Image: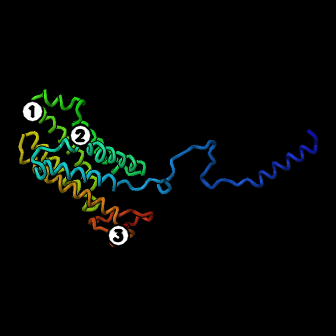
Amino acid sequence: MTPGDEHSGSSNSQEEHKNHIPPPQGYTYPSEIHIVAPPVQFRRFGNAAALGLITFGICTVQESMMQTGMSVGYGHGYGSMTAQSITVAGIAQLLAGLWQLANGDTFEGAAFTSFGASWIAKGLAQVPGTGVLAYQQTESPETVRRQQGIIALTWSIWVLILLAGNVKSHVANIVLFGTLNLQLDFSCAGTWLNHERLIKTGGWFGFFCGLSAMYNAAAILLNEENFWFNLPVGNWYTPVIKGEDDGLYAV
């Protein structure tokens, strides 16, 4: 290396040092670049809650009308819902739940995903060849009835948890999960005891639950941007957050 090269290298080093911008206080430049998910405000996922609510509501109203005997008679017509159970209330609602999880909404993601999977299972149970229909024909009616009651009981517990997580939400949501819980409670008791009136009562609660879900979906879709007014949902709770100065303020 010649003396001129040494002088040139020293000059370049001084220039790099002069142009170096120190990092902000408390921050160090990472040695490696990590690819992370973009923040929520930059994601391209829309609000999938309306999709999950409307698919659940449509099929719940139909099933409840059959359960109460309003359409084709008590206990008949469930086979006609096989395709909708799998695709509409099942796959579509399951995808809505996964989109909500990607949006960072754990509550709605867990609710829609679990109920979507339940509707898929309910629809597949009506498909010949899955073994469910053959099992029900070989087992005693009492055994099948009590096992269906156990299934309704466990889902009733899950809906009760969801209802507890909605007590600070708006009234329309509370009505939705409250009627859904009552539907499962009465259906569980009626199935377990083989009591037709209890099962029909559960169907009526399910009917109003489905209508409530459809109303909640409409409240999301219809607003002042595309409708004349916002649909009322009954916001009754004002959360109070503790500020930095230890003062309390409402949001």
The quadrant holding residue 176 is bottom left
Q: Which mark is residue 122?
A: 2
Residue at left 42%, top 51%? 103
Q: Secondary structure at mark 1?
A: helix
C-alpha distance separating marks 3 and 2: 36 Å
Task: Tell me the amino acid under the disc marked 3.
Answer: Phe
User: What is the residue that sits farthest to the bottom in this orientation?
Assistant: 228
Task: Tell me the amino acid under the disc marked 2.
Answer: Lys
Residue ID for mark 1: 141
Q: What x and y, as percent, mark residue 223?
A: 35, 67
Q: Which mark is residue 10?
A: none
Residue ID for mark 3: 227
- Looking at the image, residue 239 sits to the left or right of residue 133; the answer is right
Disc 2 crowd rating (10 Å Cα; few below 14, some 14-19, many 20+) is some
Task: Tell me the amino acid under the disc marked 1.
Answer: Pro
Q: How is the image coloured?
A: rainbow
User: What is the residue that sits farthest to the top in this orientation?
Assistant: 138
- Looking at the image, residue 47 sits to the left or right of residue 34; the answer is left
Asked if the residue at tag 1 contacts the one at tag 3, i.e. Cβ–Cβ closer than 8 Å, the answer is: no
The first of marks 3 and 1 along the sequence is: 1
Asked if the residue at tag 2 contacts the one at tag 3, i.e. Cβ–Cβ closer than 8 Å, the answer is: no
Whether residue 182 is situated above or below residue 134 in the rendered picture: below
Asked if the residue at tag 2 contacts the one at tag 1, i.e. Cβ–Cβ closer than 8 Å, the answer is: no
Mark count: 3
